Image (tube, helix red, strand yellow):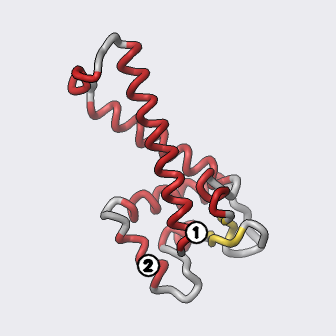
């Protein structure tokens, strides 16, 4: 469980950095300073950042590893050997992951209660997490 938490932490730091850069350069391009932050339209900005973050998670998961998973040396694989880890599975996994993360990460407790340590997001997408060398 610790490698997963480490991977999620690295991914959240990467995403937060990208989000901050997007907001910073958006403000610079508009000629706004930090004091003008409240001028930015919150709805469209939040939607853009949500889509950008979900896209990062889904795209990297489709290849088996996000940057955080690379650091933690774990990867996402199909739960069954006869299926592939495609973009559709990774989108489902990412969307359910985001829903589970929303209530302070409490949704991930499902992984602690199962014998195979698969969270609800893994069950919905038909995936599991393994050591990268496995």
Disc 2 target residue: 110
Q: Nearer the viewer, mark 2 or mark 1?
A: 1
Question: Circle 2 — which element?
Answer: helix
**Quadrant of residue 125 within the rendered picture:** bottom right
Does residue 95 appear to the left or right of 105 in the view shown?
right
Q: Which residue is pictured at 34% across the width and 37% down the height?
A: 46
Picture coordinates of residue 133, whole percent (x, y): 78, 69
Label number found at residue 109: none
Sort mark 2 into few (<14), some (14-19) or many (20+) by Cα contacts within 10 Å: some
The answer to which of 85 and 24 lies nearer the viewer is 24
Please tell me which residue is depicted at 37% across the width and 66% down the height of the picture. Answer: 105
Give how far across and how far down residue 27 sits, in percent: 35, 19
Quadrant containing the C terminus in the rendered view: bottom right
Comparing 106 with 47, the one in front is 106
46 or 27: nearer the eye? 27
Report the residue marked by disc 1.
Answer: 3
Q: Earlier in the sequence, mark 2 or mark 1?
A: 1
Rate crowding at label 1 as few (under 14), some (14 to 19) or many (20 or more) other CA atoms within 10 Å: some
Residue 107 coordinates in the image, percent (x, y): 38, 70
**Alpha-carbon span between mark 2 and mark 1:** 16 Å
Q: Residue at x 54, y 44 (%)?
A: 55
């Amino acid at each position: 469980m610790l490698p997963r938490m480490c991977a999620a932490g690295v991914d959240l730091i990467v995403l937060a950095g990208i989000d901050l850069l997007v907001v910073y350069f958006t403000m610079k391009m508009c000629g706004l300073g930090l004091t003008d932050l409240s001028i930015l339209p919150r709805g469209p900005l939040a939607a853009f950042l949500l889509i950008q973050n979900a896209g990062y998670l889904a795209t990297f998961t489709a290849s088996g590893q996000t940057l955080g998973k690379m650091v933690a040396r774990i990867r996402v694989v199909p739960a069954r050997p006869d299926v592939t880890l495609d973009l559709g599975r990774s989108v489902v996994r990412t969307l359910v992951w985001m829903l589970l993360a929303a209530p302070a990460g409490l949704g991930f407790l499902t992984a602690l209660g199962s014998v195979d340590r698969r969270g609800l997001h893994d069950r919905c997408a038909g995936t599991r997490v393994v050591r990268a060398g496995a």
